[in-house]
Image (cartoon, helix red, strand yellow):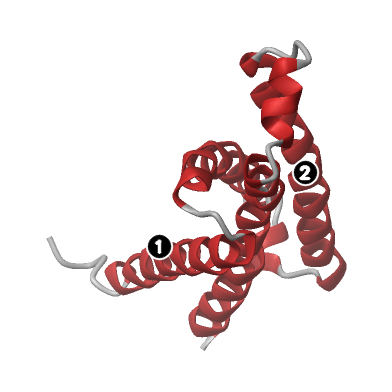
């Protein structure tokens, strides 16, 4: 029963953290469609500075969200996430997820011209990957005694 509750909590965290990286491309698409990005490049902003600034701003926003998730786990004292051995792993996992999924979202911004369509589509893709990965992990844990 405890494993089932932990699996449901993990899926809820996946739901929460899937929408955040997908929201990062809303402004990128809007800037591209309205030609604001082109105006910045014409004004002298180099593409490297543009993308690095976007990335670090998104990471600041993601870090705030990660801190709130960790704070909720600590506040509700979920032992499977906040034990002394698991809390650093949780923080590292959430942080590394943000650092890895955000650059994956940026190229996807060129596939869409409507920000809302991109947000829904990329949120669904993130949910699909996250839920299936978690489900596979929990199913494989059932077979840990087999060679």
20 lies above or below 4: above
**Image point (59%, 60%), residue name:** 114
Mark 2 closeness class: few <14, some 14–19, many ≥20 residues within 10 Å: some
Per the model, the C-alpha gap separating discs 1 and 2 is 21 Å
The picture quadrant where one finds residue 77 is bottom right
Residue 26 is marked as none
Q: Residue at x 31, y 74 (%)?
A: 139
Q: Nearer the viewer, residue 59 or 12?
A: 59
For this view, does 42 lie left or right of residue 113?
A: right
Q: Secondary structure at mark 2?
A: helix
Q: Secondary structure at mark 1?
A: helix
Q: Position of residue 144 (x, y in %)?
A: 26, 65
Residue linked to disc 1: 129
Residue bearing mark 2: 63
Q: Nearer the viewer, residue 75 or 107?
A: 107
Q: Residue furthest left?
A: 147
The location of residue 80, given as percent across then percent down, is: 63, 65
Q: Earlier in the sequence, mark 1 or mark 2?
A: 2
Left or right of residue 16: residue 127? left
Q: Residue furthest bottom?
A: 1
Q: Nearer the viewer, residue 116 or 106?
A: 116
Left or right: residue 29 compared with residue 82? left
Answer above or below: position of 51 versus 29: above
């Amino acid at each position: 029963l405890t494993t089932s509750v932990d699996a449901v909590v993990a899926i809820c965290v996946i739901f929460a953290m899937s929408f955040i990286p997908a929201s990062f491309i809303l402004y990128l698409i809007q800037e591209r469609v309205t030609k604001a990005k082109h105006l910045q490049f014409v004004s002298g902003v180099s593409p490297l500075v543009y993308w690095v600034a976007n990335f670090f701003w998104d990471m600041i926003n993601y870090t705030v969200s990660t801190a709130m998730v960790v704070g909720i786990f600590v506040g509700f004292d979920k032992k499977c996430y906040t034990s002394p051995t698991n809390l650093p792993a949780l923080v590292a996992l959430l942080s590394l997820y943000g650092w890895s999924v955000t650059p994956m979202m940026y190229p996807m911004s060129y596939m869409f011209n409507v920000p809302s369509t991109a947000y829904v589509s990329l949120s669904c893709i993130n949910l699909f990957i996250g839920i299936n990965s978690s489900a596979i992990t929990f199913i494989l844990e059932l077979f840990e005694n087999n060679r």
